[in-house]
Amino acid sequence: MISKYFYYLRGWLTSLRYFARPALIAQRGPLAVYRRYGTISIGQRSLFWPHAKLSCEGTAQQAAHLHIGERVQIGDHAQIHCGVSLTIEDDVMISWGCSIMDRDFHPNGLGEEQRRPTRIGRSAWIACNVVILKGVNIGEEAIIGAGAVVTRDIPARAIAAGNPARVIGQRPVSA
Ligand SMILES: CC(C)(COP(=O)(O)OP(=O)(O)OC[C@H]1O[C@@H](n2cnc3c(N)ncnc32)[C@H](O)[C@@H]1OP(=O)(O)O)[C@@H](O)C(=O)NCCC(=O)NCCS
């Protein structure tokens, strides 16, 4: 049985190689990291499930900043793509198969590709196979239902679902 110490050792080695500062993170399987013209910072005790992917790619003119807080969980095959500024605050849970991005990767017409800062607030829960698009701000403790495509901001403690995601309920305020 592979112990959690091995997962932490592997995560720490990954942090030495790719992240702005060393971090005690657990890496339970392969983690793909791509970084160019940008910085990645990760808080302590965050957990990466197998085959998650992080990309952080700014431009020669503007660096990109990907920040993942403490105790964040990133599920299997989840993909996080940062092209300008993407923040995932402390205690966020991201389930398997999610795609989160602050950029389009290709121009949608004439001119430059669109990139807009994107944030997921503290203790939000992003259920499986959710897509979160550029410029979205997800409030603290919000829940995004399975399979949602989030194109607009979601308020704190809202429960949102569907494509495009709409608020379908409200999470009770934690004691
Ligand atoms: C978001 C979620 C937590 C809400 O659960 P809930 O509060 O029990 O919601 P309900 O099942 O009572 O559904 C309420 C309404 O929202 C709709 N709804 C719920 N989840 C939905 C979703 N993911 N997409 C679209 N509509 C959804 C329901 O159809 C229902 O609509 P109706 O009132 O017209 O019948 C849950 O539906 C969900 O997505 N769970 C997935 C969890 C997951 O991915 N876990 C992976 C491990 S982290």
Image (cartoon, rainbow, N blue to C red):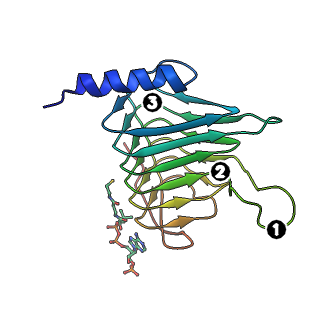
| Image quarter of the N terminus | top left
Instruction: Tell me the number on the disc at residue 70.
Output: 3
Judged by depth in the image, the label closer to the viewer, 1 or 3, is: 1
Relative to 66, 61 lies left or right = right
Q: Which of 38 and 135 lies nearest the eye of the viewer?
A: 38
The residue drawn where x is 36% and y is 49% is 76
Relative to 165, 60 lies left or right = right
Toward which corner of the image does residue 155 lie, by quadrant?
bottom right
Residue at which label 2 appears: 102
Instruction: Please report whichever mark, 1 or 3, sits nearer to the chain's N-terminal start.
Output: 3
Q: Is residue 60 visible?
A: yes
Q: Is residue 24 visible?
A: no
Around disc 3, counting alpha carbons within 10 Å, would you say few (fewer than 14), some (14 to 19), or many (20 or more)?
A: many
Q: Which of 92 and 37 lies nearest the eye of the viewer?
A: 37
Instruction: Please report whichever mark, 2 or 3, sits nearer to the chain's N-terminal start.
Output: 3
Disc 3 marks a residue whose amino acid type is Glu
Relative to 13, 150 lies left or right = right
| Image quarter of the C terminus | top left
Asked if the residue under mark 3 is in contact with the one under mark 1, i.e. CB atoms within 8 Å, the reply is no
Residue at which label 1 appears: 109
Disc 2 marks a residue whose amino acid type is Asp
Asked if the residue under mark 2 is in contact with the one under mark 1, i.e. CB atoms within 8 Å, the reply is no
Toward which corner of the image does residue 151 lie, by quadrant?
bottom right
Around disc 1, counting alpha carbons within 10 Å, would you say few (fewer than 14), some (14 to 19), or many (20 or more)?
A: few
The residue drawn where x is 40% and y is 51% is 77
Is label 3 in a helix, a strand or a loop?
loop
Is label 1 in a helix, a strand or a loop?
loop
Instruction: Please report whichever mark, 1 or 2, sits nearer to the chain's N-terminal start.
Output: 2
Q: CA distance from mark 2 to mark 3?
A: 20 Å
The residue drawn where x is 47% and y is 44% is 53
Is residue 101 shown above or below 69? below
Is residue 97 shown above or below 5? below
